Image: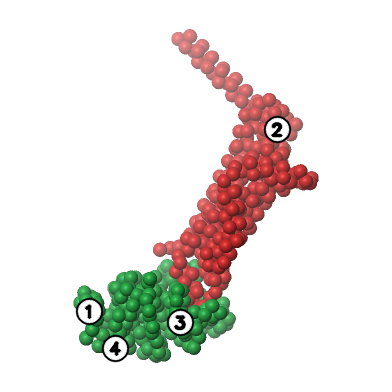
Chain colours: A red, B green
C-alpha cells in the first residue's frame, strides 16, 4: 500500500514540475523586457497589412472581374488577355515566391517601407482570387435578369449597376469574407521580406529565449482569436443578408 | 440554323399568336423582334427604323417594346413598386412621383395595390406574371411581346394572366404572343402563325387556322393537342 502511495506522489511531483516548467516558459516568452509589446506590435503590422491588402485586392478584383464579364459582350479581347495572364500567374506561383520576387525587384532600386511592399504584394495576390469570386458572383445571377433589364430599355451598364450587381453582392460578400480570413493567415509569411509581423515577432522572441514553442503557440492563439471573431462576424452578416430571401 | 427565311409584317393593332412544337424557333423569332437574339442575316424594321443596323440605338427602341418572359424575371431585390418604376425613372422618362402614381394606377387595374411594398418572393406565380406585364406597360410600349407567359404557371393562375392579356388586346395593344394556349389564340388573336423547324409553315385567322388547317404538319400538330 505504501509503495502505491509513494508512486502516486511521484507522479504528482512530475506533473507539477512539468506544469511549472511550462508556465515558466510561457512567462519568459511574455513578461521579461516587456516582450508582450513585441507581440502587440507584430499584431499591429499583421492587421495593417491585411487591411491594406484586402482593400487593394478588392479594387483589383472588381476591375478584373468586370473586364472579364463584359469582354464577352464587347471587344475587350486585349484587356481580357492581360487579366487572364495576371490571374494565371498569381494562382500558378507560390505566394512566398511572389513576395520574394517583388521585394527583390523593388529593393534593388529604392529604399522603401517593407510593410507597404508586403501590403502591395498581398494585395496583388488577393486581387486574383477576389476577381474570381466577383466574376462567379456576377455570373451566378440568372440570365433572365439581364434580359429583363435590357428589354425595358436599360443599357448594359445601367442593368449591371441597378439589377445585377446588387444581387451579386449577396453571393460575393460571404466568399469575400472568407478570402479576408485566408489573407490574414497568409500574412504570416511576410517575415521572409523582413517585415516584423506577428509570426516574425514570435520567432524573434523565441530566438532570445532559446525556447521557440511558447511564442509560436501564443501567436497561433492570437491568429485563432482573430479568425474566430471574424468568422462569427461573417455569420451574423450572412444571416442579415439572407433576411430578404424568405420563400 | 434556328430560323430560316422568315419574312413577316406585323401591323399596328394586330394580335399575332405564334404556336408550334419545341425547337420550332418560335421563341427565337419573338426574341429577334427586340434583338435579344441577333439574326445572322436579314433585317428587322420597327416603326420605320432598321433596328438591325449597327448604328441603331437598340436601348431607345426597346423602350417602345414591352417583353414578358416565361420565368417572369422580376427583380427580387426590389419591391413590387420599385420593379415597376425602375426603368421609367432611371431612363429619365418620368419623375419618381409620376412613376409611382402610374405604378399605383397599374396595380389598381390588376387589384394588387396592397402588394406595392412587398417583394416578388412573397407573391404567387400569377401575381408575379401580372406584375411583370404591368412593369412592361409602365414604359408605354407600342407593342407587347409575350414569350410563353403562362407556361410556368400553376393551371389555376393561367386564367388571371390570360384575362389581363385579353384586356390589353381589347384596348388595342399590338401583341405578339408565343403560347400553347390555343383557346387564347382563338379568343384574342387576329392571326395565328404555325412554326416548324424554323419556318412559318402556315398562318391564318384563328377560326380558319383551327377549323380548316391546310399543311399536313399543322394537321398533325393540332390533332395531337386538341
Which residue carries the number 2 mark? A204
Left/right of residue A99 with respect to residue B137 in the rendered view: right
Q: Residue beneath label 4, please? A: B205
Q: Residue at x 40, y 87 (%)?
A: B10
Foreground mark, 4 or 2, reads 4
- Looking at the rendered image, the quarter that the C terminus of chain A falls into is bottom left
- How far apart marks 4 and 2 lie (CA) works out to 89 Å
Q: Nearer the viewer, residue B203 or A17?
A: B203
* Residues marked 4 and 2, same chain: no
**Would you identify the image quadrant in which residue B178 lies?**
bottom left
Q: Pointer 2 indicates a residue of which chain?
A: A
**B7 vs A87: above or below:** below
Q: Gap between marks 3 and 2, in whole Å? A: 74 Å
Q: Earlier in the sequence, mark 3 or mark 1?
A: 3
x 32%, y 78%: residue: B195
Using the numbered discs, state the Cα–Cα distance from disc 3 to disc 4 in whole angstroms. Answer: 24 Å
**Residue A165 locus on image (x, y percent):** 54, 65
Foreground mark, 3 or 4, reads: 3
Q: Is the residue under label 2 in contact with that under label 3 (CB below 8 Å)? A: no
Residue A226 vertical placement versus A208 (above, below): below
Number of labels in the image equals 4
* Residue named by callout 3: B44
Marked residue nearer the N-terminal end (4 or 1): 4
* Distance of label 4 from label 1 (alpha carbons): 18 Å
The percent coordinates of residue A23 (x first, y second) are 63, 27
Residue A3 visible in rendering? yes
Amino acid at each position: 500500500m505504501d509503495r502505491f502511495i509513494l508512486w502516486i506522489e511521484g507522479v504528482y511531483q512530475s506533473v507539477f514540475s512539468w506544469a511549472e516548467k511550462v508556465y515558466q516558459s510561457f512567462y519568459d516568452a511574455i513578461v521579461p523586457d516587456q516582450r508582450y509589446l513585441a507581440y502587440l506590435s507584430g499584431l499591429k503590422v499583421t492587421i495593417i497589412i491585411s487591411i491594406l491588402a484586402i482593400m487593394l485586392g478588392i479594387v483589383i478584383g472588381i476591375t478584373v472581374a468586370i473586364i472579364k464579364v463584359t469582354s464577352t459582350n464587347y471587344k475587350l479581347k486585349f484587356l481580357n488577355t492581360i487579366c487572364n495572364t495576371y490571374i494565371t500567374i498569381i494562382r500558378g506561383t507560390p505566394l512566398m515566391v511572389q513576395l520574394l520576387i517583388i521585394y527583390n525587384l523593388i529593393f534593388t532600386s529604392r529604399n522603401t517601407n517593407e510593410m507597404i511592399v508586403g501590403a502591395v504584394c498581398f494585395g496583388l495576390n488577393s486581387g486574383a482570387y477576389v476577381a474570381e469570386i466577383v466574376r462567379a458572383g456576377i455570373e451566378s445571377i440568372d440570365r433572365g435578369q439581364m434580359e429583363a433589364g435590357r428589354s425595358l430599355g436599360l443599357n448594359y451598364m445601367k442593368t449591371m449597376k441597378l439589377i445585377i450587381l446588387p444581387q451579386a453582392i449577396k453571393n460575393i460578400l460571404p466568399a469575400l469574407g472568407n478570402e479576408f480570413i485566408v489573407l490574414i493567415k497568409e500574412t504570416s509569411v511576410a517575415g521572409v521580406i523582413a517585415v516584423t509581423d506577428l509570426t516574425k515577432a514570435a520567432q524573434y522572441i523565441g530566438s532570445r529565449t532559446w525556447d521557440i514553442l511558447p511564442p509560436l503557440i501564443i501567436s497561433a492563439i492570437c491568429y485563432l482569436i482573430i479568425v474566430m471573431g471574424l468568422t462569427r462576424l461573417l455569420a451574423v452578416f450572412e444571416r442579415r443578408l439572407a433576411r430578404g430571401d424568405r420563400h | 440554323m434556328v430560323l430560316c427565311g422568315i419574312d413577316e409584317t406585323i401591323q399596328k393593332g394586330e394580335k399575332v399568336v405564334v404556336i408550334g412544337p419545341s425547337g420550332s424557333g418560335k421563341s427565337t423569332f419573338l426574341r429577334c423582334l427586340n434583338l435579344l437574339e441577333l439574326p445572322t442575316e436579314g433585317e428587322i424594321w420597327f416603326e420605320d427604323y432598321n433596328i438591325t443596323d449597327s448604328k441603331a440605338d437598340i436601348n431607345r427602341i426597346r423602350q417602345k417594346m414591352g417583353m414578358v418572359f416565361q420565368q417572369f424575371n422580376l427583380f427580387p431585390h426590389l419591391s413590387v413598386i420599385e420593379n415597376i418604376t425602375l426603368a421609367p425613372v432611371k431612363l429619365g422618362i418620368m419623375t419618381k412621383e409620376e412613376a409611382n402614381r402610374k405604378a399605383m394606377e397599374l396595380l389598381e387595374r390588376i387589384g394588387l395595390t396592397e402588394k406595392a411594398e412587398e417583394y416578388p418572393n412573397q407573391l404567387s406565380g400569377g401575381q408575379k406574371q401580372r406584375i411583370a406585364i404591368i412593369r412592361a406597360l409602365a414604359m408605354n410600349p407600342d407593342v407587347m411581346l409575350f414569350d410563353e407567359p403562362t407556361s410556368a404557371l400553376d393551371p389555376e393562375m393561367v386564367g388571371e394572366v390570360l384575362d389581363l392579356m385579353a384586356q390589353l388586346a381589347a384596348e388595342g395593344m399590338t401583341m405578339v404572343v408565343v403560347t400553347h394556349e390555343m383557346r387564347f389564340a382563338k379568343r384574342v388573336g387576329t392571326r395565328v402563325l404555325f412554326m416548324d423547324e424554323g419556318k412559318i409553315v402556315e398562318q391564318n385567322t384563328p377560326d380558319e387556322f383551327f377549323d380548316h388547317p391546310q399543311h399536313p404538319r399543322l394537321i398533325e400538330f393540332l390533332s395531337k393537342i386538341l
